[in-house]
Image (spheres, rainbow, N blue to C red):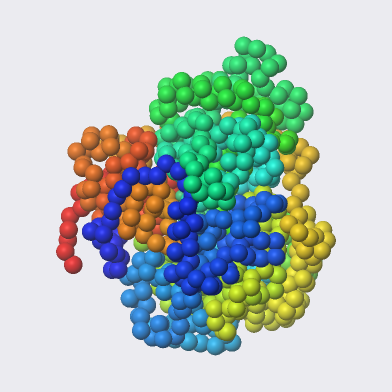
């Protein structure tokens, strides 16, 4: 399988490699976002729109799931939030004339950047069997096509229903209700590729698959770990929180193969000092870990804690917490004591003195929080790694008290809420029982397909209809060639979307595009849940991009009515007319939503209950917080190979590419770059600037190749390299997934570099 640069790629001639930045945000961030917003929306619309982001009466920023502080600045200003808004509120349009001009085959050859830049979708479009172009279709006819295909299936399990994490709580609840009333739990979602490993590990150990801290906790912490996360780009507002924590006395340990700008120093664009001054030094200790070394690091810290307790009994561990609230301590401790230092040093690539220094900081800190994101979740051993992080926190009772806890930082702005609403292929019995009781139909009990299984099922002909509310399945998923073939093997693909993307160009035998309203546009009030379990309202104000658009709730309800007829007694039409009625049902089905309609209208909304956080109640199988034993397998690669991690540039939102620069890493006007340690390059006699192919190698002997990447000598851990996704998704084998969570291993792909041979054409 080979992937070549797309036809519109400017090639490496335009690419400029400068030096990486040492700080994030500041004046350039403001300037960049205004420039970007101006290009998409014009000046007036930009200003009118940007002042509403994350305001109590405005809309929830579609950028990320980081929570809003109680005392918001006039604009909780964030460059990448502004870009996310501009991308949706753009005045560019993709109408019927555009589709008449561009054949689907033409679109399939374009980059995600080019596709996204064309603008907002404006009317339902249909690709007939054998047709070369999409043509306009009425909403009614579109619903009929979906209904007919679904009715023609031998079993409801022959359809799969994907969700991306921007979908509101109301749309997500109605969607899963429709899918389960139709008869399947095939509800793969972006979370399967994202924080699924966190959910698995936290559910096993603490009983709740969500973070246990609030912003106030961060401000009260003594020590904050930021592991496998690049907040300067992906959660810029987190930097303000870290700055505040720092000013209140916290120290910060950053664990990352890359010295990301935002982790080092931050210039707060909210303050004059941050605009002009040298900013705040955020990180006290930067551990430049090898990719996948985190389990070893936390095992080593845990071993050191046990040894410190041996040396001074009663002073290091929180015995009272362990005795009263935890389970499995002795087995865990016996195992972790045997952790070989040689393995730790090999896996982490860190000097032992540095690990001991971090240990000293831990000993000096009463309240500790560990934050993490994709650098921890997308490896084969991600679930054990995160369990080991939990062990680390449990040892000193750092869960369920102020200033301490677990903080998996979510990605999509409502990905956590979608899960709460039941977008999950493995729903709990309690949830299904509640649904059955409320709506009077028997929901399917068998677990459904997650993302990777859905791809396999399409490939094997077991899933014939693919339906997506949001997202860009083709580009976001692993093993691009395999996924494309899988989708092309289906009878019908349906995309409910705001913007054009590759998933509209790689289709089943027939395809539909159903254009919907975005967050920024006028609709009824919807709600979302952030990364810290706070539920609040979002209210769009802009006039819709086109008069043909419908809300996600309206689309799903309309379709449900058509597909299900009177098979179930759900008032779909009333739901679409009044979202309060949906919230009333959510309240009756999902714990924690008591008095939902009233409470969500209070300023700032409300916070969902969380047993471990609120009362040290751990709803696990043992009823306690579970220590666990996690094997330390050092990720060793054959001689000459590197471990590739795939990351986001500063100018992208997942598969939406805002621009071709990655300012903080010094890259301009190009994305086909691979960042490699200079010593690794020297060892291979490859010069900076060389054009190479990235070739991934998999156990079964298969190879996957992404062509024509410019080598950039970069400060990353030895033996590791980094490149951007989605261009590199072709390299991730479909079967390379995390144990237990089945998340694609997008952060540990074994590759070799080969000189690129120009094949012409
Ligand atoms: N502007 C913007 N904001 C976004 C997104 C976006 O694309 N653009 N995406 C959203 C989504 S869906 C998500 S999930 C989040 C993602 O937020 P992040 O997780 O910050 O995103 P990545 O770019 O994948 O960065 C992963 C980080 O982990 C590091 N890393 C890689 N492997 C390892 C490892 O083995 N160990 C350690 N310790 N570190 C490692 C990388 O160097 C990098 O700094 O951001 C959300 N917010
Ligand atoms: N190699 C590699 N692959 C990865 C990752 C990685 O780190 N490395 N990260 C993974 C992660 S963390 C995630 S979350 C996934 C993301 O996977 P997805 O969520 O599937 O991808 P996005 O790029 O966020 O989806 C963008 C599309 O969503 C649509 N959209 C935007 N807003 C709305 C809306 O309000 N409503 C509707 N209906 N549609 C909307 C637009 O059409 C846009 O083109 O990718 C994963 N893939
Ligand atoms: Mo994500």
Q: Residue at x 54, y 59 (%)?
A: 81
Q: Position of residue 656 (x, y in %)?
A: 45, 63
Q: Is residue 284 visible?
A: yes
| Residue 184 sits above or below residue 410 on the image | below
Q: Residue at x 50, y 30 (%)?
A: 285
Q: Residue at x 64, y 73 (%)?
A: 541
Pick the residue in front: 231 or 560.
231
Pick the residue in front: 707 or 44.
44
Q: Quadrant of residue 35?
A: bottom left
Pick the residue in front: 409 or 72.
72
Q: Position of residue 279 (x, y in %)?
A: 51, 41
Quadrant (top left/top right/bottom left/bottom right) for the N terminus:
bottom left
| Residue 468 sits above or below residue 623 on the image | below
Q: Residue at x 37, y 38 (%)?
A: 716
Q: Is residue 737 visible?
A: no
- For the image, the number of numbered tags is 0
In the picture provided, is 313 more to the left or to the right than 231? right
Q: Position of residue 422 (x, y in %)?
A: 67, 60
In the picture provided, is 481 more to the left or to the right than 391? left
Q: Position of residue 570 (x, y in %)?
A: 75, 75
Quadrant (top left/top right/bottom left/bottom right) for the C terminus:
bottom left
């Amino acid at each position: 399988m080979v992937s070549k640069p797309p036809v519109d790629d400017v090639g490496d001639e335009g690419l400029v490699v400068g030096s990486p930045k040492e700080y994030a945000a500041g004046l350039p961030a403001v300037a960049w976002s205004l420039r970007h917003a101006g290009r998409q929306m014009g000046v007036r619309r930009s200003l009118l729109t940007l002042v509403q982001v994350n305001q109590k009466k405005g809309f929830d920023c579609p950028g990320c799931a980081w929570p809003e502080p109680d005392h918001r600045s006039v604009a909780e200003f964030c460059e990448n939030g502004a870009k996310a808004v501009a991308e949706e509120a753009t005045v560019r349009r993709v109408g019927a004339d555009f589709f008449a001009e561009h054949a689907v085959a033409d679109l399939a050859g374009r980059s995600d950047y080019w596709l996204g830049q064309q603008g907002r979708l404006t009317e339902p479009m249909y690709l007939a069997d054998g047709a070369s172009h999409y043509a306009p279709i009425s909403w009614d006819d579109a619903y009929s096509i979906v209904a007919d295909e679904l009715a023609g299936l031998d079993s409801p399990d022959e359809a799969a229903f994907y969700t991306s994490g921007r979908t509101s709580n109301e749309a997500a609840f109605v969607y899963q209700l429709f899918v389960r009333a139709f008869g399947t739990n095939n509800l793969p979602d972006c979370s399967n590729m994202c924080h699924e490993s966190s959910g698995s590990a936290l559910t096993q150990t603490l009983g709740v698959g969500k973070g246990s801290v609030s912003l106030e906790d961060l401000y009260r912490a003594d020590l904050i770990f930021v592991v496998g996360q690049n907040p300067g780009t992906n959660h810029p507002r987190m930097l303000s929180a870290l700055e505040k924590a720092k000013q209140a006395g916290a120290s910060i340990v950053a664990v990352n193969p890359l010295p990301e700008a935002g982790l080092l120093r931050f210039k707060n664009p909210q303050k004059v000092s941050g605009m002009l001054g040298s900013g705040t030094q955020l990180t006290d200790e930067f551990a430049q870990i090898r990719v996948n070394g985190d389990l070893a690091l936390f095992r080593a810290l845990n071993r050191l804690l046990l040894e410190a307790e041996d040396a001074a009994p009663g002073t290091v561990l929180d015995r009272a917490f362990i005795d009263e609230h935890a389970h499995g301590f002795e087995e865990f401790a016996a195992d972790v004591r045997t952790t070989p230092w040689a393995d730790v040093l090999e896996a982490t690539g860190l000097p032992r003195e540095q690990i001991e220094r971090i240990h000293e900081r831990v000993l000096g800190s009463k309240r500790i929080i560990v934050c993490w994101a994709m650098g921890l979740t997308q490896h084969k051993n991600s679930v054990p790694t995160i369990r080991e992080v939990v062990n680390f926190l449990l040892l000193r009772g750092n869960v369920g008290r102020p200033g301490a806890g677990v903080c998996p930082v979510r990605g999509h702005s409502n990905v956590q809420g979608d899960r709460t609403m039941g977008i999950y292929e493995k729903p709990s019995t309690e949830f299904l029982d509640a649904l059955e009781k409320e709506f009077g139909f028997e929901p399917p009990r068998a677990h459904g397909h997650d993302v990777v299984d859905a791809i396999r099922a399409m490939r094997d002909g077991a899933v014939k209809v693919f339906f997506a509310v949001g997202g860009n399945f083709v580009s976001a998923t692993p093993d691009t060639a395999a996924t494309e073939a899988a989708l092309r093997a289906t009878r019908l693909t349906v995309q409910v979307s705001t913007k054009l993307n590759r998933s509209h160009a790689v289709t089943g035998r027939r395809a539909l595009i159903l254009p919907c309203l975005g967050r920024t546009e006028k609709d009824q009030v919807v709600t979302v849940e952030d990364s810290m379990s706070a539920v609040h309202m979002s209210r769009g104000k802009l006039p819709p991009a086109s008069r043909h658009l419908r809300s996600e709730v309206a689309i799903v309800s309309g379709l449900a009515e058509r597909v299900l007829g009177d098979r179930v007694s759900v008032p779909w039409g009333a739901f679409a007319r009044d979202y309060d009625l949906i919230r009333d049902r959510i309240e009756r089905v999902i714990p924690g939503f008591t008095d939902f309609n009233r409470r969500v209208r209070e300023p700032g909304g409300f916070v969902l209950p969380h047993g471990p956080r609120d009362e040290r109640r751990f709803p696990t199988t043992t009823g306690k917080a579970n220590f666990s034993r996690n094997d330390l397998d050092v990720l060793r690669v054959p001689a000459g190979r590197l471990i590739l991690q795939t990351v986001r540039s500063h100018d992208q939102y997942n598969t939406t590419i805002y621009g071709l620069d990655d300012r903080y890493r010094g890259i301009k006007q190009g994305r086909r770059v691979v960042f490699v340690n200079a010593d690794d390059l020297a060892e291979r006699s490859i010069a900076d600037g060389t054009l190479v192919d990235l070739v991934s190698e998999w156990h079964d002997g298969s190879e996957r190749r992404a062509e024509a990447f410019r080598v950039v000598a970069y400060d990353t851990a030895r033996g590791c390299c980094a490149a951007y996704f989605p261009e590199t998704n072709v390299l991730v084998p479909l079967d390379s997934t995390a144990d237990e969570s089945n998340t694609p291993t997008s952060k540990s792909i074994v590759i070799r570099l080969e000189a690129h041979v120009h094949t012409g054409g």
